[in-house]
Image (cartoon, rainbow, N blue to C red):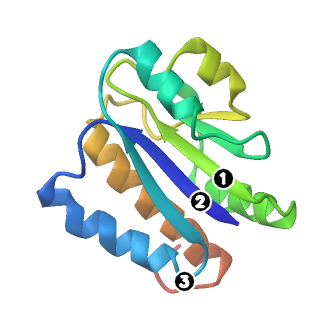
């Protein structure tokens, strides 16, 4: 399964870039992972640009503050389910400052929240890539996740 993370905004902040790249590299041992950064504009333009990079076969996850909160083990189970279903590509979308359009959100199979807190988009990038790595660690009985 391939993983694509589409995010709106600037390239990674240099203070977070090393950590994001580290987790991206770690994930690559389990799955092909790629990042796509869409420039900030308005919600309609951002959502249209994101939609251009989606395929009908993709399983789409939108991260949204009003989405369903899940635990790390649930994320691992979700990823395992996608692997078992032979999903070709899992796409995780981090919208701009005002999220994504209702239309784009409605096209997603899942709308998830990382926290009830309002988080900066740069930090969300780090959190989601770390959680994906942690999920793969759980699935592969790695030492990274402790119970």
Looking at marks 2 and 1 on the same chain, the residue that comes earlier in the sequence is marked by 2
- Residue on which the image places disc 1: 90
Q: Position of residue 85 (x, y in %)?
A: 87, 60
Rendered view: 26 above or below 73: below
- Residue on which the image places disc 2: 3
Q: Is residue 25 left or right of residue 79?
A: left
How far apart in space, not on screen, are marks 3 and 1 (Cα)?
Answer: 16 Å
Q: Quadrant of residue 69?
A: top right
Pick out the residue farthest to the left: 15
Q: Position of residue 51 (x, y in %)?
A: 58, 30
Q: Quadrant of residue 84?
A: bottom right
Q: Nearer the viewer, residue 129 or 88?
A: 88
Q: Nearer the viewer, residue 139 or 61?
A: 61
Looking at marks 2 and 3 on the same chain, the residue that comes earlier in the sequence is marked by 2
How far apart in space, not on screen, are marks 2 and 3 (Cα)?
Answer: 12 Å
Q: Residue at x 36, y 27 (%)?
A: 96
Q: Residue at x 69, y 56 (%)?
A: 89
Q: Nearer the viewer, residue 146 or 22?
A: 22
Q: Position of residue 145 (x, y in %)?
A: 49, 75
User: In this view of the protein, can residue 146 be seen by the observer?
Assistant: no
Mark 2 in CB contact with mark 1 (< 8 angstroms): yes
Mark 1 burial class by Cα count in 10 Å: few <14, some 14-19, many 20+:
many
Mark 2 burial class by Cα count in 10 Å: few <14, some 14-19, many 20+:
many
Q: Secondary structure at mark 2?
A: strand
Q: Position of residue 122 (x, y in %)?
A: 26, 45
Q: Nearer the viewer, residue 21 or 52?
A: 52
- Residue on which the image places disc 3: 29
Rendered view: 39 above or below 137: above
Q: Secondary structure at mark 1?
A: strand
Q: Secondary structure at mark 3?
A: loop
Pick out the residue farthest to the right: 85
């Amino acid at each position: 399964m391939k993983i694509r993370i589409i995010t709106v905004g600037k390239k990674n902040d240099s203070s977070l870039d090393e950590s994001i790249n580290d987790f991206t590299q770690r994930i690559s041992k389990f799955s092909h992972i790629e990042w796509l950064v869409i420039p900030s504009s308005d919600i309609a333009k951002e959502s249209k640009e994101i939609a251009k990079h989606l395929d009908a076969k993709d399983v789409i996850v939108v991260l949204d503050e009003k989405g369903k909160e899940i635990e790390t083990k649930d994320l691992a189970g979700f990823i395992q389910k996608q692997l078992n279903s032979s999903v070709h590509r899992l796409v995780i979308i981090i919208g701009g400052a005002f999220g994504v359009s209702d239309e784009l959100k409605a096209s997603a199979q899942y709308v998830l929240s990382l926290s009830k807190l309002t988080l900066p988009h740069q930090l969300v990038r780090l959190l989601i890539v770390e959680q994906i790595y942690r999920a793969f660690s759980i699935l592969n009985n790695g030492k990274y996740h402790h119970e």
